[in-house]
Image (tube, coloured by chain):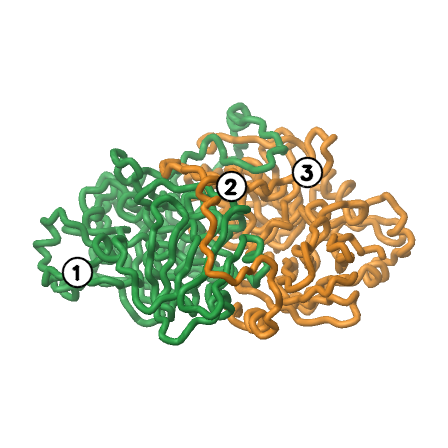
Chain colours: A green, B orange
């Protein structure tokens, strides 16, 4: 990995001042022993420290079933702990008995098939690290009037997902001529339905039963979820019970009315599945406060439904100049990718931002470029209370003189 | 990744029979809904399904502070969930207040330094996926008279570790001429001490404060542990409070008396840090039972302190013939690496085993080769109740006619 490179050299060369560094022969205070608590090594399943309070927060506490947001400001590396993965459901979840659960594959196939979980686990498994992002992450409404990066960017997470490739099962079932879509259905009371083109199903869609080395959590679809790499999270149907092979999409409520993109001419576009290139500086970020001037490692995450992240640039002067950030290994396709850049804050007001480029060469747009491409008047975006999904402009954070970090997207 | 390759093709081509596959137009039974339980989406920190019971087990339940073993038989992919990471302590752990914790770097340095956790987190961070293996994993004693792979192989785990490179701090402190070792000390009541050559400290040792995307758990050394890639886990000092730069090892109890290797001439060899190449088939494995003849994906893990895994071979006929297993991406240096091979069990007794080769070309030895290299009489190993650490022979599992899997290492 590239970590032995410029970061370390610059840190050493600049000899930047670190708060809290004491040059002395002193030994650490004994206070740490007095405040420590004995932990028995006998727990079958371990827990966090009593001092660790990083938590998901509800998007809208007044909702009966609010979305629960990942504390992305606390992230390091690229893996989101399963217990902190975001949830964006329109109904409550379920905890299904895996012994009772079945997956049906039917419709335009030669051989309808039913699988138990044990059947699926006997098949060749693959593990892949991928992000999962709600199309409402960083949506227009959530990009305004929010107080933390957890509220703006907390609807994306990244895990190691393990399961069977859907293509393996579809080939076994024998897809018939003329079939062009699949429709996936959930086993919860919502009977959630999602239509997905057959091409994607035959490519890289997983039937995931493990997440981060253990069974998928109930809130993520235990015992089985569809996992559709790089596409809006609403494609990755939880509590998966049925896949029907069909020749046209189902036109269900959640794929038409509620998740279309309203463009400049007032019309909605449906079935835009892929998440665009996006990046954000997670530290320093909205809601944080720098304790003092001096050295900081600017760090953040970049991802794209279009594949791997090829480049991340960071500006610390309001966009006048850009520097290539260090991209940390590993770089997976359609996964969070960690980047960093050394920065010395001189105590003046500064606007910091990042933009990424994916393997296709697609670049994360500015707010102005996005408005132009989508044919929208910027004034409308500034003033409307309507929402816009799949919103992926370059985010700007303003570091003020007192060290507090503010949202500078619309200024 | 390579998962679209031979596994899938062979599964399809051979058309092997799968139990539980029903060809019918039937729909999944409604039973799954009746046995499902509503899960509210409001938990700040998620939990496992009530149906998931995978757990660590104590090595010796009569011990006051037994080792706690990872359920490696339940693994998929390469990440071990933090809650299932093995623990092998000789004393209880501690949960230390991170605000009170300090790290002292002193000894043969120009500038002794004290760091708070906030100081450390401001420095450039790196994240790396590495295994951590107790030198007692698969030790001679544990390779005999055990009933599950969790008991033989449950002292290795693999995580994404995030922290600061120790070399960054040592360079800042200014290592003096003549220094050749560091001594690391823990902050728990054990005041555990470990000596490590300075070369390794300047290479890839991490001061880790995150594991799998969240703060290191108390049982793994919260708020700070030394992480020494590829070396025996006893090097990776938990609850790290002090690093002294010195010109000779400390010769502490845990690095001499209790962790030396007894060789053929009866003498002990100290300071052999690196873990050798090792692999094991995790499914089917000791303690499991195959429900029926037919297709199985043989899957397992390989790792080496010598770097990345280059090759894994599997034999399903008692060692007469070997086939190259599929190595699954990602392959990290000094990390668990997943491998698999298609297998059709015909219902007869078979001995299955795996051997790995690392990037240096080092091959996991047979039991006989290991005895020869170490100058030990095989009969002694068969009969002794003494223990042998860093034991890495090829493990053999016997699949019997009734489908049960037994330990065939010494037969």
Residue B46 position in % (x across, y down): 44, 39
Identify the residue position indicated by label 2 in the image: B216
Between the residue at mark 1 and the residue at mark 3, the CA separation in whole angstroms equals 59 Å
Residue at coordinates 41% horizontally, 60% vertically from top-left?
A243
From the viewer's side, name the closer residue of A25 and B257: B257
Number of the label disc, if any, that sits on residue B30:
none
* Mark number, residue A268: 1
**Same chain, labels 1 and 3:** no
Q: Which chain carries label 3?
A: B
How busy is the neighbourhood of tag 1: few (under 14 within 10 Å), some, or many (20 plus)?
few
Q: In this view, does B82 lie to the left or right of B274?
A: left
Give the CA distance from mark 1 to mark 2. Answer: 46 Å
Residue B256: percent from left, percent from top = 76, 43
Residue at the spot of label 3: B67
Task: Tell me, yes or no, whether dots 1 and 2 are on the same chain.
Answer: no
Give SS at disc 3.
loop
Mark 1 vs mark 3: in front: 1
The subunit carrying tag 2 is B
| Label 1–label 3 contact, CB within 8 A | no
Percent position of residue A406, x then y: 22, 44
């Amino acid at each position: 990995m590239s970590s032995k490179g410029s970061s370390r050299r610059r840190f050493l060369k600049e000899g930047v001042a670190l708060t809290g560094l004491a040059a002395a022969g002193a030994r650490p205070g004994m206070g740490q022993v007095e405040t420590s608590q004995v932990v028995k090594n006998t727990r079958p399943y371990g827990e966090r420290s009593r001092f660790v309070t990083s938590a998901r927060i509800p998007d809208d506490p007044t909702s009966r079933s609010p979305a629960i947001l990942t504390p992305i400001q606390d992230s390091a590396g690229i893996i989101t702990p399963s217990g902190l993965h975001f949830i964006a459901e329109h109904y409550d979840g379920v905890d299904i008995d895996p012994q009772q659960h079945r997956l049906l594959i039917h419709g335009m196939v030669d051989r309808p098939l039913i699988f138990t979980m044990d059947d699926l686990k006997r098949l060749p498994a693959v593990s892949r690290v991928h992000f999962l992002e709600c199309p409402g992450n960083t949506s227009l409404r959530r990009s305004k009037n929010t107080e933390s990066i957890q509220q703006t960017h907390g609807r994306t997470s990244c895990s190691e997902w393990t399961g069977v490739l859907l293509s393996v099962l579809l080939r076994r079932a024998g897809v018939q001529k003329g079939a062009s879509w699949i429709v996936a259905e959930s086993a919860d009371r919502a009977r959630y339905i999602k239509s997905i083109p057959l091409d994607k199903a035959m490519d890289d869609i997983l039937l995931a039963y493990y997440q981060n080395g253990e069974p998928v959590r109930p809130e993520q679809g235990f015992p089985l979820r569809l996992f559709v790499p790089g596409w809006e999270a609403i494609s990755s149907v939880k509590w998966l019970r049925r896949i029907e092979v069909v020749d046209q999409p189902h036109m269900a409520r959640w794929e038409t009315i509620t998740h279309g993109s309203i463009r400049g001419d007032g019309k909605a576009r449906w079935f835009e599945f892929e998440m665009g290139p996006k990046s954000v500086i997670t530290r320093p970020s909205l809601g944080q406060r720098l304790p003092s001037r001096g050295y900081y490692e600017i760090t953040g995450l970049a991802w794209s439904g279009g594949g791997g992240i090829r480049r991340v640039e960071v500006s610390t002067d309001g966009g006048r100049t850009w520097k290539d950030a260090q991209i940390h290994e590993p770089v997976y396709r359609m996964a969070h990718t960690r980047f960093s850049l050394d920065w010395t804050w001189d105590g003046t007001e500064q606007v910091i931002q990042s933009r990424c480029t994916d393997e296709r060469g697609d670049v994360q747009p500015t707010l102005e470029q996005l408005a132009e491409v989508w044919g929208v008047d910027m004034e409308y975006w500034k003033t409307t209370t309507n929402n816009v999904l799949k919103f992926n402009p370059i985010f700007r954070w303003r570091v003020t003189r007192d060290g507090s970090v503010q949202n500078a997207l619309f200024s």
